[in-house]
């Protein structure tokens, strides 16, 4: 098993080609990963029943796929692989570059110390961000600023010390100012333990922790808390391990499956480039917020009308500043007025919140998913005003925060 693991790891590392099929019908039939395995063999290796060693069983599994699907899958799989190589490079930096080197390229803050008295426990927070700290530069230069970096509000971070103790804690950035940066992390930093003077490398390992045993004499001892060393210098690194293509690759594989609900229609529209269809006229709809509605220009009104008659999808294109956010907000109002639910998603949390901010006074039920630190404070406040908050138990390294403004909207 170890040899097979190492062989597979070599393929994963070099990404030059996929490993050969096992060609064991019984083993493959029981395998939990047969779906992505079969699809990759068909779409990347151009495999068939003979090359897979599974005969008709394999051919029947992939018979719904055609050359267009193969071209689409291979193209996007190759692009994802290229992007993953950048992530690998950044991950290596965590181990091979000193903090001042990574700080030059904006992915680290080195030689920072805890601002005295800043520690606090965040009540009701998840495990990933239950302890709050503020860091400042130990010896800042006149031109230094925490704001000028890739480490921004909501960014996942890894905290280590400058003596080589890596990943003492993980968490998120909760505030960035010129001279201070605040974080919410999963561990108390003074829980990091150091080797004691009696450390025996051959037989045992002893550590001095956050409690110290003090001999009171006459065979009695007591435990007293040790104080964290305020002169410890830390480094805050952008968490390169939190990024990855796993979810995107999973979606790409799911798009090529045979029996997933609605996937045939998606392949027709996305992969086979079948044009979307539209109804002759839109069903009746109303737009709230009369004042802003009156300011809509001709193109914005046409975009809303186009969306309302779409059977499949409609694309609204526009340069920055042309009013796309306002248009989307009105589209959501129109759809909600028809009793429909709307999934609003974007590449960034800021884009989602910019639209939700336009809807915060409309009484629209909102179910907001995302890292707490990346959600706009006003959106969090809108959700809290309903007195309804659902949170994940923190078992996942990627924190999930959900606030549910029900406003009598059923949750299904």
Image: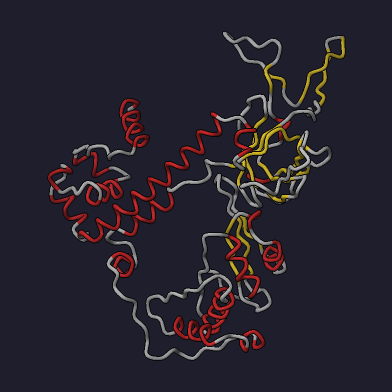
Report the residue at 61% width, 54% height from top: 371
- Whether residue 166 is visible: yes
Q: Residue 343 location, x and y as percent?
A: 50, 69
Q: Quadrant of residue 110?
A: top right
Q: Nearer the viewer, residue 246 or 363?
A: 246
Can I make out residue 237 in this image?
no
Q: Is residue 155 left or right of residue 59?
A: right
Where in the figure is residue 130, as x and y percent of width and height?
Answer: 69, 45
What quarter of the picture does the N terminus occupy? top left
Residue 147 x %, y %: 70, 49
Q: How many tags in the picture? A: 0
Horizontal side, residue 217 vs residue 278: left or right: right
What residue is rendered at 67% in x and 28% in y?
162
Q: Residue at x 52, y 71 (%)?
A: 319
Up the image or down, 330 lies above or below 223; here it is below
| In this picture, residue 299 sits left or right of residue 17 | right
How far across and down, in percent of the image, does residue 336 sit? 54, 80
Q: Is residue 6 above or below residue 208?
A: below
Which one is nearer the viewer's eye here, 381 or 321? 321
Give 15 or 117, whichever is nearer the viewer. 15
In this view, which residue lies farthest toward the front? Answer: 143
Q: Is residue 213 above or below residue 63?
A: above
Q: State the colouring used for the structure image.
A: secondary structure
Which residue is most to the right?
A: 217
């Amino acid at each position: 098993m170890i040899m097979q693991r190492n062989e597979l790891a070599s393929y994963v590392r070099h990404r030059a080609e996929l490993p050969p099929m096992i060609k064991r019908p019984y083993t493959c039939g029981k395998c939990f990963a047969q779906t992505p395995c079969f699809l990759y063999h068909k779409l990347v290796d151009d495999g068939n029943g003979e090359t897979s060693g599974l005969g008709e069983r394999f051919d029947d599994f992939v018979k719904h796929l055609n050359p267009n699907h193969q071209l689409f899958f291979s193209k996007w799989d190759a692009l994802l692989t290229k992007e993953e190589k950048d992530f690998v490079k950044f991950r290596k930096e965590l181990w091979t570059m000193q903090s001042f080197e990574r700080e030059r390229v904006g992915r680290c803050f080195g030689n920072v110390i805890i601002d005295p008295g800043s520690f606090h426990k965040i009540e009701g927070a998840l495990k990933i961000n239950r302890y709050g700290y503020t860091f400042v530069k130990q010896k800042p230069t006149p031109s230094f600023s925490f704001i000028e970096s890739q480490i921004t509000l909501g960014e996942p971070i890894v905290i280590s010390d400058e003596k080589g103790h890596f990943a003492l804690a993980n968490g998120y950035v909760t505030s960035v100012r010129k001279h201070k940066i605040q974080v919410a992390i999963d561990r108390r930093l003074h829980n990091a333990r150091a080797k004691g003077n009696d450390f025996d490398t051959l037989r045992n390992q002893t550590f001095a922790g956050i409690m110290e045993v003090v001999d009171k004499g006459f065979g009695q001892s007591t435990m007293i808390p040790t104080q964290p060393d305020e002169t410890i210098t830390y480094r805050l690194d952008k968490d390169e391990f939190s990024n990855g293509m796993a979810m995107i690759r999973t979606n790409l594989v799911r798009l090529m499956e045979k029996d997933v609900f609605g996937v045939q229609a998606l392949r027709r529209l996305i992969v086979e480039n079948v044009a979307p269809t539209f109804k002759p006229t839109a069903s009746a709809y109303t737009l709230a917020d009369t004042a802003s509605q009156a300011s809509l220009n001709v193109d914005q009104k046409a975009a809303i009308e186009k969306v309302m008659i779409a059977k499949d999808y409609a694309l609204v294109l526009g340069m920055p500043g042309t009013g796309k956010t306002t248009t989307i907000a009105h589209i959501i109002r129109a759809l909600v007025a028809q009793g429909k639910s709307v999934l609003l998603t974007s590449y960034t949390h800021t884009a989602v919140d910019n639209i939700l901010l336009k809807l915060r006074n409309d009484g629209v039920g909102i179910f907001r998913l995302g890292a707490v630190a990346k959600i706009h404070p006003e959106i969090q406040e809108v959700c809290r005003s309903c007195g309804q908050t659902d949170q994940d138990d923190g078992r996942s390294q990627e924190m999930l925060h959900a606030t549910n403004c029900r406003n009598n909207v059923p949750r299904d």
